[in-house]
Image (cartoon, grey):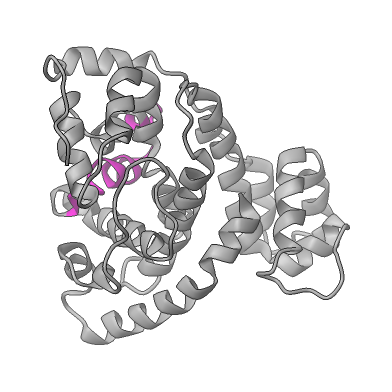
Amino acid sequence: MSTLSNAGPYSDDEIRQRIEHCPKLASLQSINRKLAGLVNSEQSYTGQIAEIIRRDPSLTARLLRMVNSVYFGLSAKVNNIEEAVLYMGLRQIRELSMATPVIEDMEKISSTALKLPWRELWQHSIGTAIMTREILANTNLLVDDDTDYIVGLLHNVGKVVLGTAWPREFAQLVETEYTDPDAVCVAERELIGWDHAMIGGYYLERHQLAPEIVEAVRFHASPAQAGEHQLYAAAVKVADLVVRETGIPSGFERIPAPMPGSWCDNEAWDLLFKDSDRESSLARNAIEKTMERLPSMLSAMV
């Protein structure tokens, strides 16, 4: 890794002030609430769901692009939203409806002059959300809402904030080569004082998100420190490695792809499945199946 030059890390107070001056993500407080209510209702109708989707051009475009992708492998093109809803299923509709406004909001605040592969970051974020949900579904943690998906979706929001609040340092960070994701966090702390996980956690705390979301994002690089929310943080760390292995990097840092299977050979995996070899084996099988179709799914979504 090349040497990073800077006058030294900022004080905690200045870091907080810069984060607080970043634009807010309006979508975090109301992620398509009306649509969410419908897809969670036992009495919802395809027509009602389609009508709400029609009011959102971006969501409509993503929905049709995804249902007509290689991932679904349909013989005829689908142009009807109601038909697309039937093919997609309520779970994927809900996931798409959460990802779309968050990504649009992050695009608005990521106003850096650097020419960066933002699409890779959005694909990586959605991929991590999908895999975090897959991983936690194989543990004994009961998740009765969308926290599992949201923590994966937002785990790298700190990178967007970092690029907005510290553009000069951010430029240095993205031009540097690293051995692994942990080395990126070390470099961020050298330059700024906080890494992107800490920055993201504080940013989401200012949005008054639930503690499990805040702590999972804040400690996704070091899940053992997340206390009672360490399973969420550990799932995000594993999911991040899984997505990287499929060839979808986080978009910014120059990091070599992880060794195959390294996602189930680390401390985060042990936190998730230390008490059950059977759960560990079932989780590996489920993850490997999803990995095969993940790139085509993400290419359609973003």
Q: Is residue 116 located in the magenta-colored stretch of the structure?
A: no
Relative depth, front residue between 227 and 125: 125
Tell me where residue 245 appears, x and y as whole percent: 37, 65
Q: Position of residue 76 (x, y in %)?
A: 87, 71
Report the front residue among 173 and 280: 173
Confirm whether residue 40 shows in the render. Answer: no
212 magenta-colored: yes
Residue 168 can be seen in this image:
yes
The quarter of the picture where residue 56 lies is top right
118 sits left or right of 58 in the view: left
State which quadrant residue 42 falls in: bottom right
Residue 259, placed above or below residue 124: below
Residue at position x 57%, y 46% in the image: 98
* Residue 107 drawn above or below residue 277: above
Q: Foreground residue, 140 or 174?
A: 174
For the point 55% across and 38% down, the residue is 103
Q: Residue at x 25, y 18 (%)?
A: 16
Point out residue 88 in the picture as x, y percentages from the top left corner. 70, 65
Left or right, 3 with respect to 21, comes to left
Image location (x, y in percent) of residue 69: 71, 64
State the quadrant of the N terminus: top left
Query: The magenta stretch spans which residues?
Result: 204-223
Would residue 200 be found to the left or right of residue 290 on screen? left
Count of residue discs: 0
- Give the main secondary structure, helix, strand or loop, of the magenta stretch: helix
Asked if residue 293 lies left or right of residue 17, the reply is right
Q: Residue at x 51, y 45 (%)?
A: 122
Which residue is outermost to the bottom? 278
